[in-house]
């Protein structure tokens, strides 16, 4: 037979009331023969053992004089019932700590029943507290790992940003701008544009297949590889873009252990003296040459074809050459734009498929008096209005090179070479 032990703790002026309540509990205990061993003591006195359940009998001043002792009982998860002459504000507040607070005339049978129920639940509360402690320790470890992961991702993003150009090329004839929006901490897209000397602008946009850290690591490898490749062909000439992509592809294939790591890319050079543009593509969306005229804008895809980077070690890449005219803008973009501006369901399998994002990209050159910077800002504002803009499905990159309206107007031509 299990006989629980409990205390009736009382204010100094409530000794008689405490003994009365102890006797009443003994008489009204729900299970005869299992009545608790009850001892009376002063609140906060030497015999006030916080491990035992208790009934607090308060005096006329209520809970205020015993605030520290009641807080200690709550901290120890003590099964406790508080009896007082009147239930005022401080006493009602104790109910928020899980204590039962009643008047001194609370019926003895109900008091004994409530105390019995509290004792019965105490083992369950102890188990729950232990489980909560284990959970808190576990989640604390997980939170630490998440924080460490976030710190590492911020560092990775910082390293990737260091590979991006701090300043884009600008001449009297050409200006350059970019939209770069990673879907996460790091991006599977990367771009670059730089003046090789006072004549040539070399540029590229690459998109590693996939997302997150693996894709970002591959873009870093692509950027590093392109920077190491010899771009000059000697005698004031640049290495043909097709040869640059061929050399980069060979390097990626040779160094890759995982055959599933591959990327798309566009690499090109622009002769700012002659306005001749030459570029090559490796499985990337076709760059757009957007012309602004009296009748609106005209969009011409520059179709230099080629396989993905990092798959075939003997891959060959075509290149195309054209002369840019004043008012024209070259746009090299990643396929994230196709996700942002999806094709209507009734047009996805028609010959018109894929034209939605092209229409928005062509808007970059829509206004004659607008600078390239303002045009790109307008396109970014449009991106902000799209569904899912706060949680991008893919990285977004668009590199733009515009020829100013004040430049001389060479004859436009397009040629394709193997």
Image (cartoon, helix red, strand yellow):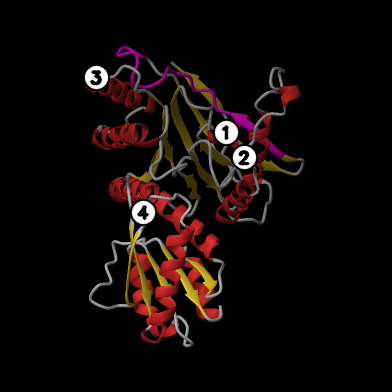
Q: Residues within 10 Å of mark 1 (few under 14, many from 20)?
A: many
| For marks 3 and 4 on the same chain, the one whose residue lies earlier in the sequence | 4
Callouts 2 and 3 close, C-beta under 8 Å? no
Q: Position of residue 65 (x, y in %)?
A: 40, 85
CA gap between label 3 and label 4 equals 32 Å
Which image quarter: residue 302?
top right
Q: CA distance from mark 3 to mark 1?
A: 34 Å
> Against 221, is 69 above or below?
below
Q: Are marks 2 and 4 in contact (CB under 8 Å)?
A: no
Q: Which numbered dot is residue 288?
A: 1
Q: Earlier in the sequence, mark 2 or mark 4?
A: 4
The answer to whether residue 379 is visible is yes
**Mark 2: few/some/many CA within 10 Å (<14, 14-19, 20+):** many
Q: Which residue is mark 4?
A: 166
Look at mark 3 in the image and give the residue it sits on. Answer: 257
Element carrying mark 3: loop
Span colored in magenta:
297-315
Q: Is residue 179 above or below residue 79?
A: above
Residue 241 picture location, percent across and down:
38, 28
Are the two marked residues, 1 and 2, in contact with CB atoms closer than 8 angstroms? Answer: yes
Residue 308 is inside the magenta segment: yes
Q: Secondary structure at mark 4?
A: loop
Q: Residue at x 39, y 74 (%)?
A: 19
**Label 4 crowd bin: few (<14), some (14–19), many (20+), radius 10 Å:** few
């Amino acid at each position: 037979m299990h006989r629980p032990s409990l205390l009736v703790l009382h204010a100094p002026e409530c000794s008689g009331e405490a003994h009365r309540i102890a006797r009443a509990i003994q008489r009204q205990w729900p299970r005869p023969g299992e009545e608790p061993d009850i001892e009376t003591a002063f609140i906060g006195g030497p015999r006030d053992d916080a491990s035992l359940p208790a009934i607090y009998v308060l005096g006329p001043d209520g809970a205020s004089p015993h605030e520290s002792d009641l807080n200690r009982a709550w901290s120890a998860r003590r099964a406790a019932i508080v009896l007082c002459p009147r239930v005022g504000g401080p006493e009602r507040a104790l109910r928020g700590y899980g204590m039962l607070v009643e008047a001194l005339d609370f019926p003895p049978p109900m008091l004994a029943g409530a105390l019995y129920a509290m004792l019965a639940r105490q083992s369950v509360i102890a188990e729950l507290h232990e489980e909560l402690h284990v959970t808190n320790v576990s989640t604390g470890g997980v939170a630490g790992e998440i924080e460490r992961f976030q710190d590492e991702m911020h560092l990775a993003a910082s390293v990737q940003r260091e590979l991006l150009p701090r300043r884009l090329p600008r001449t009297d004839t050409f200006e350059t701008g970019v939209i770069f929006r990673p879907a996460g901490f790091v991006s599977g897209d990367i771009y670059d544009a730089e003046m090789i000397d006072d004549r040539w602008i070399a540029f590229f946009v690459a998109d590693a297949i996939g997302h997150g850290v693996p894709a970002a690591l591959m873009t870093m490898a692509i950027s590093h590889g392109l920077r190491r490749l010899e771009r000059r062909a000697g005698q004031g000439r640049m290495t043909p873009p097709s040869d640059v992509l061929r050399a980069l592809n060979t390097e990626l294939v040779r160094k890759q252990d995982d055959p599933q790591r591959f990327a798309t890319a566009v690499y090109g050079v622009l002769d700012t003296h002659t306005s001749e543009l030459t570029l090559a593509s490796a499985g990337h969306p076709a760059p757009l040459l957007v012309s602004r005229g009296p009748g609106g804008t005209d969009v011409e895809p520059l179709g230099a074809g080629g396989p993905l980077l990092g798959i075939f070690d003997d891959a060959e890449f075509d290149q195309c050459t054209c002369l840019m005219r004043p008012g024209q803008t070259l746009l090299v973009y990643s396929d994230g734009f196709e996700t942002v501006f999806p094709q209507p369901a009734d047009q996805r399998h028609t010959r018109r498929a894929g034209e939605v994002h092209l229409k928005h990209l062509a808007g970059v050159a829509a206004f004659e008096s607008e600078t390239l910077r303002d045009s790109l800002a307008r396109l970014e504002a449009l991106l902000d209005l799209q569904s899912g803009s706060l949680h991008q499905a893919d990285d977004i990159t668009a590199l733009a090179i515009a020829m100013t309206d004040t430049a001389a107007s060479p004859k436009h031509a397009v040629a394709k070479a193997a």
